[in-house]
Amino acid sequence: MRRGFKTEAKKLALELREELGADAHVPFDPYEFAESYGIDVIKLSTLGTDARLEFLKADGSALSGALIPVGTGQVILENDAQPAARRRTTLCHEIAHVVLEHSFGISLANERKCGLAGDQEAEADWLSGEMLIPYDGALRLARAGAPDVRVAQAFDVSLAVARWRMNGSGARTVAARMRAKWQP
Ligand SMILES: [Zn+2]
């Protein structure tokens, strides 16, 4: 990941949230964001059988979503058979590619990757994490000693995403340091 990217992503995610009138402490709605950004989201279940099988086969494992260039824009194809929290994560990841203006052909996403070059993948993952649980929101909950399950509920994400953000963003480390500082 490019130096300084994490700091930029922190700020950018708050700006993207602001466009929806959302602060750092509420769930992020990627469907609402996609609509306001002019990105069509197509459900896999609405495609004809042939097209659907083509996408599922192209991936081999469980397809989560895909980013498809159409004209000068993009559409996101989402596998709506997957659980809601997973779909929201996939959508945020694909939206992050669009917002960061990554170059791509068709990007198929399975559980962990969507076939783009390493840096673009890492950036989209990191930005989507900030969109789902901003650092400020993670820090507030870390200071309150919130367990992963409460974080997952507060931000409407999976337990895995909650854990990843609370630990990976450094929020818990910073909160622990703050606590230590105030202890006699
Ligand atoms: Zn990706």
Image (cartoon, helix red, strand yellow):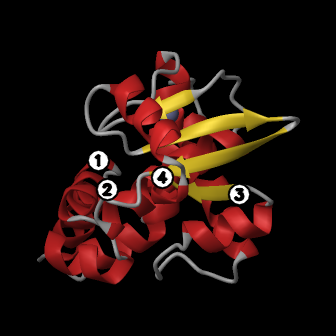
Specify the label residue 168 is tagged with: 1
Mark 4 in CB contact with mark 3 (< 8 angstroms): no
Specify the label residue 40 is tagged with: 3
Residue at horizontal 63 percent and vertical 65 percent from the top: 14
Q: Amino acid at mark 3?
A: Asp
* In this picture, residue 153 sits left or right of residue 120: left
What is the spatial separation of the Cα atoms under label 2 and label 4, in whole angstroms?
28 Å
Is the residue 142 above or below the residue 56 in the image?
Answer: below
Mark 4 in CB contact with mark 1 (< 8 angstroms): no
Q: Which sits earlier in the primary sequence, circle 1 or circle 3?
A: 3
Specify the label residue 165 is tagged with: 2
Q: Residue furthest front?
A: 49
Specify the label residue 44 is tagged with: 4
Disc nearest the viewer among 2 and 4: 4
Q: Amino acid at mark 2?
A: Arg
**Taking the image as drawn, is residue 122 in sight?**
no
In this rendered view, identify the residue nearer to me: 128 or 146. Answer: 128
Q: Amino acid at mark 4?
A: Leu
Mark 1 in CB contact with mark 2 (< 8 angstroms): yes
What is the spatial separation of the Cα atoms under label 3 and label 2, in whole angstroms?
28 Å
Q: Residues within 10 Å of mark 1 (few under 14, many from 20)?
A: some
Whole-percent x, y for residue 149 in the image = 15, 75
What is the spatial separation of the Cα atoms under label 4 and label 3, in whole angstroms?
13 Å
Whole-percent x, y for residue 82 in the image = 30, 58
